[in-house]
Amino acid sequence: MVPHRDVYSQLATTSADLGYYQLLMLMTEQGRDYDEGGGYVDHDGYRFRYEPFTHAGDVVVYDGRSIHGVADIDPMSELELQRFTGRVAALVSLFRYLAPDTNAYGAMSTDGASRFT
């Protein structure tokens, strides 16, 4: 997953004047379930790869405004869908309810682009 910010999730909390934090629970472990890749946060030109310091069951919390992503998991290994291997994480994100019969999505996209770019 390329470096990014959680722009649309932030809109759910900034309009209410709340901070936005992303929670994820790691369900696998680097070195046991996969060898390469994993989550990272970019800051001041440095990429901090946090998964070498975590264990399955750990909860990671970061400011959703940070630039973050996931480096390819074992990119040279063959994908095996018959076995439970690789990296698994559970995420919970906040979103606004958008009425289907309005242009709410277009308005939110414009709002996000003007605030967070």
Image (cartoon, rainbow, N blue to C red):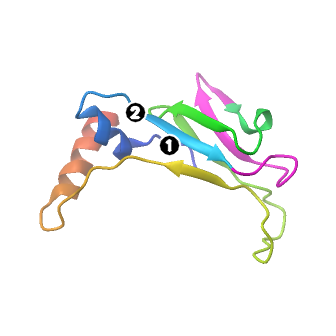
Q: Amino acid at mark 1?
A: His
Q: Residues within 10 Å of mark 1 (few under 14, many from 20)?
A: some
User: Is residue 1 at least partly visible in the picture?
Assistant: no
The earlier-in-sequence mark between 1 and 2 is 1
Residue 100 drawn above or below residue 69 = below
- Residue that extends furthest to the top in the rendered view of this protein: 44
Q: To which residue does mark 2 refer?
A: 20
Residue 77 drawn above or below residue 93 = below
Query: Magenta segment, principal secondary structure?
Result: loop
| Magenta stretch in the rendered image | 27-47
Q: Classify residue 1 as left or right of residue 82.
A: left
Residue displayed at 35% across by 46% down: 8
Q: Amino acid at mark 2?
A: Tyr
Q: Nearer the viewer, residue 8 or 19?
A: 19
Q: To which residue does mark 1 refer?
A: 4
- Residue that extends furthest to the left in the rendered view of this protein: 102
- Residue 34 x, y percent position in the rendering: 82, 54
Dot 1: what SS?
loop
33 part of magenta stretch: yes
- Which image quadrant for residue 97? bottom left
Q: Quadrant of the C terminus?
A: top left
Residue displayed at 79% across by 47% down: 29
Residue 79 drawn above or below residue 54 = below
- Which image quadrant for residue 49? top right
Residue displayed at 23% across by 49% down: 108
Q: Residues within 10 Å of mark 2 (few under 14, many from 20)?
A: some
- Residue 56 x, y percent position in the rendering: 75, 45
Q: CA distance from mark 1 to mark 2?
A: 15 Å
Q: Classify residue 13 as left or right of residue 5.
A: left
